[in-house]
Structures are given as structure tokens and as C-alpha cells.
Amino acid sequence: MKITVENVVPKKNMLLLEPYKQADETEGGLVISQGDGFASPIMGTVLRVGSKATYKVDTVVMFRKYSVDALKLNTSEGQKEFYLLEDEEVIATVGE
């Protein structure tokens, strides 16, 4: 059985997220060091929600890197990494 985004059902207060790719370089050409010793928050888009989650699909959220469970799921583009996260671990939402 192939595990895909469509057949993963988060439980209770869990979120399934697609992480944003972390840029190593800004548009202006500055290189961003990832080895500064601090765990910078990362962003992702909510794809699926559990029955008691407080966030909705398509919400962009920020969270700490070490608060997620990473998993590889099959997509039309091959395998990609996704995250499972408890909604209490969200530290901010990003508005448009």
C-alpha cells in the first residue's frame, strides 16, 4: 500500500504539514547560515487536520524544527517529506 497525503488521517489535535523549503540564500544574494546554534522556527502549510485541531487546511504556520515527526509520503512528484505536528506546538500563523 502506498501512503499518500490523501490517505493520512491525523488524529485529534494533530496537523499534517507540507514544509516550506528553507532558503540558503536571499534574493539579494546573502548566504544564510543554518549552523548558528539556534533552532530557528520553520514554516509549513496545513494539508490535513485532526478532528480536534484548531487550525484549518491551507493555514501557514510557524513551528520549532524539533517539535515535528517527519515522514516521507508518495506524491505525483515522487517521495516528499511532510511533518506531523500537534497544534499546540504552532508558535505563530502567517497572514497574507
Image: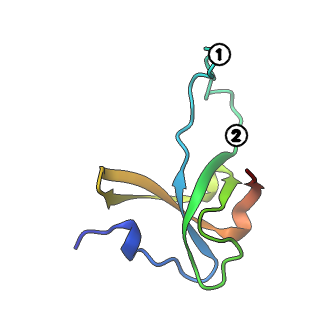
Q: Is label 2 in contact with label 1 (beta carbons under 8 Å)?
A: no
Dot 1 corresponds to which residue? 28
Identify the residue at horizontal 37%, vertical 51% (top origin): 80
Image quadrant in which the N terminus is located: bottom left
Q: Which secondary structure lies at badge 2?
A: loop
Q: Quadrant of residue 32?
A: top right
Q: How is the image coloured?
A: rainbow
Comparing 76 with 53, the one in front is: 76
Identified by mark 2, the residue type is: Ser
Q: Which mark is residue 8?
A: none
Identify the residue at horizontal 63%, vertical 57% (top origin): 67
Q: Position of residue 76 (x, y in %)?
A: 29, 56
In screen coordinates, is 8 left or right of 36?
left
Q: Is residue 12 above or below residue 66?
A: below
Q: Is residue 5 above or below residue 24?
A: below
Pair 2/1: label in front: 1
Q: Is residue 8 above or below residue 32?
A: below
Identified by mark 1, the residue type is: Gly
Q: Position of residue 37 (x, y in %)?
A: 69, 31
Dot 2 corresponds to which residue? 40
Identify the residue at horizontal 66%, vertical 78% (top origin): 53
Q: Is residue 24 above or below residue 50?
A: above
Q: Quadrant of residue 2?
A: bottom left
Q: Identify the residue at the far front of this view.
A: 96
Q: Which secondary structure lies at badge 1?
A: loop
Q: Residues within 10 Å of mark 1 (few under 14, many from 20)?
A: few
Q: Identify the residue at the far left of this view.
A: 1
Q: How far is the residue under mark 2 from the one under mark 1?
A: 21 Å
In screen coordinates, is 31 left or right of 70?
right
Q: How many marks?
A: 2
Identify the residue at horizontal 46%, vertical 57% (top origin): 82
Q: Residues within 10 Å of mark 2 (few under 14, many from 20)?
A: few
